[in-house]
Amino acid sequence: MAMNKNQIIILLSILFISLAIGLYFVGFQEGLKNAGPDVKVNGYLKTSKGGDVIVNGTNVTIKRLTESGIVAQTEPDIKLDGDGFPKLDGSGKVTYDPQKYLLDENLQMQKGSDGVPIYNPNYGNKGKDVTVGSYLRDDQGNLVSAKGNITIKKLNSKGIVIKTDPDIQLDKFGYALLNSSSKVMYNPQVYLLDNAGQIQLDSNGKPKYNPTYKFTSNPSEKYDVDNVDVTYHPSEKQIISETGSGDLRNNDIYVLKPEIIKTRAADSTAYQNALAELADSQSSTEPDLKKKEDNIKIKRDAVSKASAKLDLDNQIIEQSNKDFLAYQAAISSGDNNAIDKAIATLTANQNYIKIARSNVQGDINYYNPASFRFGTSSTYVPNYEDSVYLSRTTGQSTIGEILNPAYMLGGMCDYYKNQPTQLEAACQKLDKNTCASTSCCVLLGGAKCVSGTEQGPTVKSNFSDIYVRNRDYYYYQGKCYGNCPP
């Protein structure tokens, strides 16, 4: 049956629409190729063409699917499009998730010297989503709270959080450090803290700020008063704790050397200056009463330190002056042995000091013209130094003889076990009365010690020795073998 023109047009339209619908569904199925029953967790990721996605010679593994079954996350964690296929850069390479890896400018993973990808240490804080002004999160992505959310104030060049508000202690990855009670710990430089690292509050419930915080860059700049005129030893340190600051600081020690040059008086300038600063602080009219009180407390502490130091220096100088005056008096009286009345030694700090020497044995009688060195009386008893000088044993060694170790530590039988000639010679040198007690010698005929065992002499030529009368028996380890005598 022939078709008219309209029927042909309708038929062609139907075919065209069917073809378009078919192509659409083919494309749709192609777009959802990474979805459906064949796409499973821990399976391998496919490209839009059906091939495996390979990264560094290894298949990319599927780690998570959406509710529609589309691939949402892989290992390694690469960027995916809405249909679960990998996003490629201009050179056709896969790109990586910047939240998990440290990437270069081309969104390719940075690798260490061992070739292993470098993970973003701040990944738990959502990487690129961590910005100044946002809230701090823990390594699970949860908000960190300390009477409210904690705001990020500063990031380093790697995007890691290094400062927050309130100012809490952070680890090297930008996460909050927690105490044993799982509470955040605050920065001890800014706030006054309790033993648990928690901020101390005043009567109004407001945080107590550390009044010495502005001096932490140089703790000794204003309040470490150490200007007394004494000798400085930089190797000696003393750790002191500032009240309430939680900050341990190094304070240089100043000491007087024992070598006395002249009498001196302690310099009280530091003490007077500290008193003046305290008086000035007490008379000032600062708008913040708490700040003023804290400032006065610091000045009082400085006065106490300077006063204690001044007292200590006065004690040292007083004793030093006494020693110096005594030395001067001894020299003036003509006592040439004054310097020998003390023993010079080193302290643990490598400073010379002088210790008075007791006269238990009497003074050493050095040679003086027109004097008898050892006295003239028969009752003369020398002191220790003179007794050593006069002793008849002076110069004689009191060291005992050192015994050298034996060179045959295991005995001659063990030493010569692989040298029959030397063993034979060693056995012949043994005493006849000890020969048969060894494990390598026999007493042939009761007269000749030769090498052997319970089977007899090792060297058979000993049986033809005409100087051995009874060669038909021998002794080995206390027993007689052969034609033994009755």
Image (tube, grey):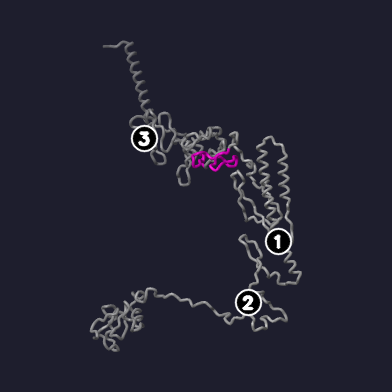
Q: CA distance from mark 3 to mark 1?
A: 85 Å
Q: Nearer the viewer, mark 3 or mark 2?
A: 2
Using residue 25 as the reference point, say whether residue 299 is left or right of it: right
| Image position, residue 54 (x, y; %) | 40, 38
Q: Residue at x 60, y 40 (%)?
A: 190
Q: Circle 1 sits in a helix, a strand or a loop, which is it?
A: helix
Q: Nearer the viewer, residue 173 or 446?
A: 446
In this rendering, the answer to whether 5 lies above or below 266 is: above
Q: Is residue 192 magenta?
A: yes
In the displayed image of the protein, which residue is found farthest to the front?
A: 379
Q: CA distance from mark 2 to mark 1?
A: 32 Å
- To which residue does mark 2 refer? 383
The three-letter code of the residue at mark 2 reads Asn
Q: Mark 3 packing: few (<14 Cα in 10 Å), some, or many (20+)?
A: some
Looking at the rendered image, the quarter that the N terminus falls into is top left
Q: Residue at x 66, y 75 (%)?
A: 364
Pointers 3 and 1 in contact (C-beta within 8 Å): no
The three-letter code of the residue at mark 1 reads Ser
- Secondary structure of the magenta portion, mostly? loop
* Residues in magenta, as a range: 172-200
| Image position, residue 10 (x, y; %) | 33, 13
Q: Nearer the viewer, residue 282 or 162?
A: 282
Using residue 126 as the reference point, say whether residue 339 is left or right of it: right
| Image position, residue 244 (x, y; %) | 60, 43
In this rendering, the answer to whether 379 lies above or below 88 is: below
- To which residue does mark 3 refer? 41
In this rendering, the answer to whether 226 lies above or below 350 is: above
- To which residue does mark 1 refer? 320
Earlier residue among tags 3 and 2? 3
Pointers 3 and 2 in contact (C-beta within 8 Å): no
Q: Nearer the viewer, residue 165 or 306?
A: 306
